[in-house]
Image: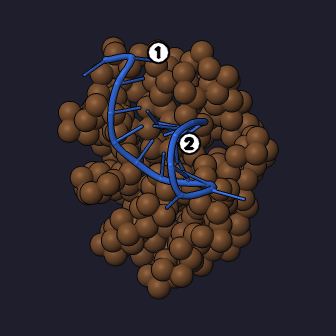
Chain colours: A brown, B blue
Amino acid sequence: MPDRLIDGAPILIATWNVNSIRARKQHLLDWLATAKPDVMCLQELKVREEEFPFDELGALGYEAAVHAQPTYNGVAVISRLPIEEVIPGFAGEEGQARLLEAVIQGVHVLSVYCPNGQDPKSDKFEYKERFFAALRAHLDGLAKPGAPLALCGDTNIAPEARDVWDPEGCAGSVGFHPREHQWLRHLADWGLHDSLRLVDQRPGLYSWWDYRGFGYGKNRGMRIDQIWVSQGLKGSVKKAWIDVDPRTWERPSDHTPVLCELAE
DNA sequence: ATGTCTTATATAATAAGA
């Protein structure tokens, strides 16, 4: 058995695809002030690193590790606990800023923004396939499943029927396609567990609703953001939930935060 | 409802994502 990884106080980890850190800066600051996560993974920064709000997050007690590019993609880990090591990027990115790892209290925290894939017939879908294969290979080279690791972010895949608003209608579409489920299963087979499903089996728990067609109002959502924990952290997951509230705010991200509390 | 709302960029109209 691995050593105890979480000493003392519980650690609250969160992940949020903000869909532009500039457009959502105040939402993020407001949410941090009340939710108070210790570690937070962010995706879709859509900003140059020099325009990332280091100072305003610093004022709330967070240091930040950022892997960004102009206009598209971009991921970060922000933390109130010291960040011991930062590894930006990996071999599968193909020039797009989609993965950053930060080591915090010995825990590997990975913020990931997986490709959307657009359409199963699109070449972007092939990129999504390569990305998932490369991500699995990256984990193979990074750590053993017994090591403490949390892979957090927007996988752009809803794992199961209970994670989409219309399983029949969505079947075969991007985000809920059998090939995508194979890729996600292969990734999870490294030794990852979907933290929310360790503690909550209810259907209809969504993290994303389409801007189009009044998706949120009709609750046409999908759970495409997850916090995956390694075998070494599985026993430490005490709570896991989705905070829908920010999706109701004015000019929201199309995603809402996902959280997981780790404790002895 | 293959829609339309979002954000980005050499700030006006377009591209791209979801």
Q: Is residue A197 above or below residue A10?
A: above
Position of residue A221 in the picture relative to residue A102 (left or right):
left
Q: Is residue A81 visible?
A: no
Task: Give the number of callouts.
Answer: 2
> Which residue corresponds to mark 2?
A192
> Which quadrant does the C terminus of chain A fall into?
bottom left
Q: Nearer the viewer, mark 1 or mark 2?
A: 1
The x, y position of residue A230, in whole percent, is 57, 49
Query: Badge 2 local density, few (<14 within 10 Å), some, or many (20+)?
Result: many
Q: Quadrant of residue A222?
A: top left
Label 1 vs label 2: CA separation? 24 Å
> Which residue corresponds to mark 1?
A172
Q: Residue furthest bottom?
A: A59
The x, y position of residue A225, in whole percent, is 45, 44
- Which of A21/A63 is in front? A21
The x, y position of residue A55, in whole percent, is 54, 82
Q: Are marks 1 and 2 in contact (CB under 8 Å)?
A: no
> Which quadrant does the N terminus of chain A fall into?
bottom right
Residue in view at x 68 percent, y 35 percent: A131
